[in-house]
Image: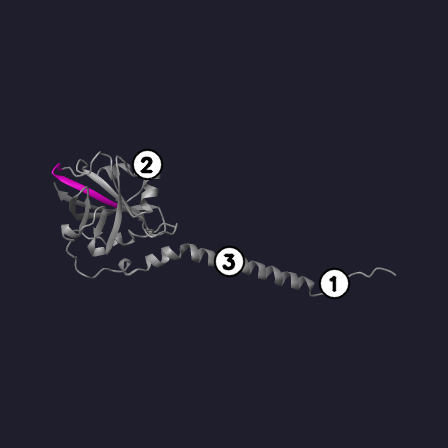
Amino acid sequence: MARENPVVTHDSPRRVAGLTKKWWFGLVLALVIGAAAWFSPLLISLAKPSVQAVTQPTTAPPVEATLAENRLFYARLGIEVPMQVLSEANPMVYSDWNKFREALRGGVALSYDTKTFEESPLSFISGHSSDIYPHEFSSVFAPLNQAEPGDTISFRIEGKTYHFSVTEKMIITPKDVKKFESLQATDPAKQRIALVTCWPLLTSKNRLVVVAERSR
């Protein structure tokens, strides 16, 4: 008996094309669902009311008795977050960034290149505005663009409470080290902090910097 050739219908190419389209659709759908699951903590945190326009008046800073150790308070922007302390560390020094990456997963990082905070004329408080890796503090500094002169920033470290008043807000490119260094107060009776985060949101193009100072 002669072997019969398989019958090839005219719609076979259409079936193959249809299966290919379904396969690609499934792949794209899986990627979209995966991306949504990965970025959902960030998107949810960015949707919090604190990121929206702040219209309420500045809230008085917490009294010293209620300030918890190693926590940053920016009452008007609704920021209350654990603060990791990194002495003898500088966010502009590349070799120090392993310390910062670890610290920022637990809140914000207060850093200074002196042995104690009191000695430092300029300290940095770094935090994420929109970290692509999902964690609790991935957008803690997203509201910083709403900072205004006169706002109060408070924290307590080593048993002492500090209150700083915001003086200015600016955008600085990450490579402009001289600009960052120029933020230091010229008056030795003044001490400054600079809150720093990546800006615009979802990029690392520039740094949004909020400068605040206090009298020693």
Name the residue tied to disc 1. Answer: 8
Residue 28 in magenta stretch: no
Q: Which circle, 1 or 2, is nearer the viewer? A: 2
For label 2, the residue is 96
- Residue type, mark 2 in image: Asp
Q: Residue flagged by tag 1: what amino acid is it?
A: Val
Image spot of residue 216 (x, y percent): 12, 40
Query: Image height check: is 52 above or below 169?
Result: below
Q: Which residue is located at x 63 percent, y 61 percent? A: 17
Q: Quick one: SS at disc 3?
A: helix
Mark 2, Cα crowd under 10 Å, few <14 / some 14-19 / many 20+, is some
Q: Is residue 206 above or below residue 24?
A: above
Magenta stretch, main secondary structure, is strand
Task: Report the side of 83 relative to 22 (left or right).
Answer: left
In 3D space, how far apart are the residues under numbered discs 3 and 1 (Cα atoms)? 33 Å
Say whether disc 1 or disc 2 marks the residue closer to the N-terminus: 1
Q: Residue at x 20, y 55 (%)?
A: 75
Instruction: State the residue in front, 53 or 152.
Output: 152
The disc label shown at residue 30, or none: 3
Left or right of residue 3, residue 96 in this image? left
Q: Residues within 10 Å of mark 1 (few under 14, many from 20)?
A: few
The alpha-carbon separation of the residues under discs 2 and 3 comes to 38 Å
Q: Is residue 129 above or below residue 110?
A: below
> Pointer 1 and pointer 2: residues touching (CB < 8 Å)?
no
Q: What range is drawn magenta here?
A: 187-195
Image quadrant in which the N terminus is located = bottom right
Nearer to me, 206 or 41: 41
